[in-house]
């Protein structure tokens, strides 16, 4: 029932259906879960669909229809770089294929791992937001409870994504107040424009969470790497030279004793 109520006005929470069903033991229980979800969803939506179907369907497909452009995503950068078309025209369709195909692959992989049911659900969410072809700034609000339920999510990177999201919002509207600025600063759809670059980095942070937050070994490797890198950056510039020089003095003194 909770899943049905969550998808009353937006289908996105429905992606939890797949890991939830996969974690239920027995096909009878899975069928019963599916039927209860479908019946509750239909019973709640049917009166509104019958009253005004055209407006009701907009809740799920959007007012621009199912053919959305590629926006605020690294997908548009990949499509533009590979020459697969315009991000609003034919390239948008190719971007949808890349996005949905990538999500299905990542979700199926998550379902085959030996994770807890909650971890599989969270991985499915990160897979969705990490490759979705339309990652608007308000989606950060949807991601907040998912990040809270992921203890291994690095707070610094979440705050970095939050700051980038603020810049995305700011540059969304800067074109109307400062039309004299160049296009790469004011156009949200330009794949390598400032707004989309900030949005792409923000999205890739959550895609990385899919691979890192549920892999303790990878977390250890990255932690050791960051510690080593930090130590190297904090080391005085002349320390390595001085140590080499001292070894040289020690070698010369040893040679003199031998003589």
Image (spheres, helix red, strand yellow):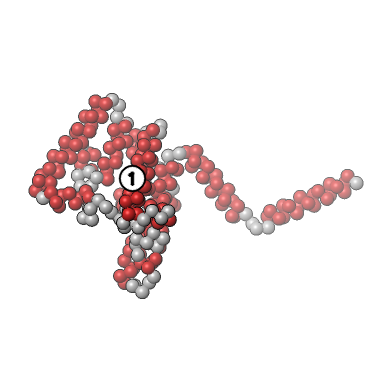
* Residue occupying image coordinates x 35% and y 50%: 94
Furthest-bottom residue in this view: 180
Q: Which residue is mark 1?
A: 100
Q: Position of residue 46 (x, y in %)?
A: 12, 43
Question: On the picture, is 191 further left or further right than 3?
Answer: right
Does residue 183 appear in this view?
yes
Furthest-right residue in this view: 259
Report the quarter where the N terminus lies.
top left
Query: In which image quadrant can residue 241 be found?
Result: bottom right
Q: Position of residue 244 (x, y in %)?
A: 73, 52
How busy is the neighbourhood of tag 1: few (under 14 within 10 Å), some, or many (20 plus)? Answer: some
Question: On the picture, is 54 further left or further right than 79?
Answer: left
Residue placed most toward the observer, 94 or 73: 94
Query: In which image quadrant can residue 150 be found?
Result: top left
Query: In which image quadrant can residue 215 be found?
Result: top left
Q: Position of residue 257 (x, y in %)?
A: 88, 46
**Above or below for 113 versus 49:** above
* Residue occupying image coordinates x 42% and y 39%: 214
Question: On the picture, is 44 further left or further right than 104?
Answer: left
Residue placed most toward the observer, 201 or 95: 95
* Residue occupying image coordinates x 29% and y 33%: 21
Classify mark 1: helix, strand or loop.
Answer: helix
Question: On the picture, is 92 further left or further right than 64?
Answer: right
* Residue occupying image coordinates x 25% and y 29%: 30
Q: Position of residue 12 (x, y in %)?
A: 27, 45
């Amino acid at each position: 029932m909770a899943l049905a109520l969550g998808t009353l006005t937006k289908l996105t929470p429905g992606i939890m259906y797949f890991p939830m069903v996969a974690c239920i033991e027995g096909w009878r229980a899975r069928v019963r879960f599916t039927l209860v979800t479908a019946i509750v969803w239909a019973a709640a939506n049917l009166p509104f669909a019958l009253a005004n179907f055209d407006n009701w369907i907009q809740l799920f497909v959007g007012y621009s229809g199912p053919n959305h452009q590629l926006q605020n995503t690294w997908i548009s950068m990949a499509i533009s770089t590979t020459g697969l078309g315009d991000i609003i025209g034919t390239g948008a369709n190719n971007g949808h294929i890349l996005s949905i195909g990538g999500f299905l692959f990542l979700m199926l992989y998550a379902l085959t791992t030996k994770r807890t049911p909650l971890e599989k659900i969270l991985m499915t969410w990160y897979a969705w937001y990490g490759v979705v072809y339309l990652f608007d700034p308000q989606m950060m609000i949807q991601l907040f409870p998912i990040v809270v339920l992921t203890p291994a999510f690095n707070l610094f990177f979440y705050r970095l994504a939050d700051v980038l999201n603020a810049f995305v919002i700011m540059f969304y509207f800067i074109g109307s107040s400062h039309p004299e600025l160049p296009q790469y600063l004011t156009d949200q759809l330009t794949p390598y424009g400032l707004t989309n670059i900030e949005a792409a980095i923000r999205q890739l942070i959550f895609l990385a969470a899919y691979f890192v937050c549920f892999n303790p070994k990878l977390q250890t490797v990255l932690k050791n790497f960051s510690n080593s890198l930090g130590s190297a950056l904090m080391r005085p510039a002349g320390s390595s030279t001085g140590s080499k020089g001292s070894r040289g003095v020690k070698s010369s003194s040893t040679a003199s004793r031998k003589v």
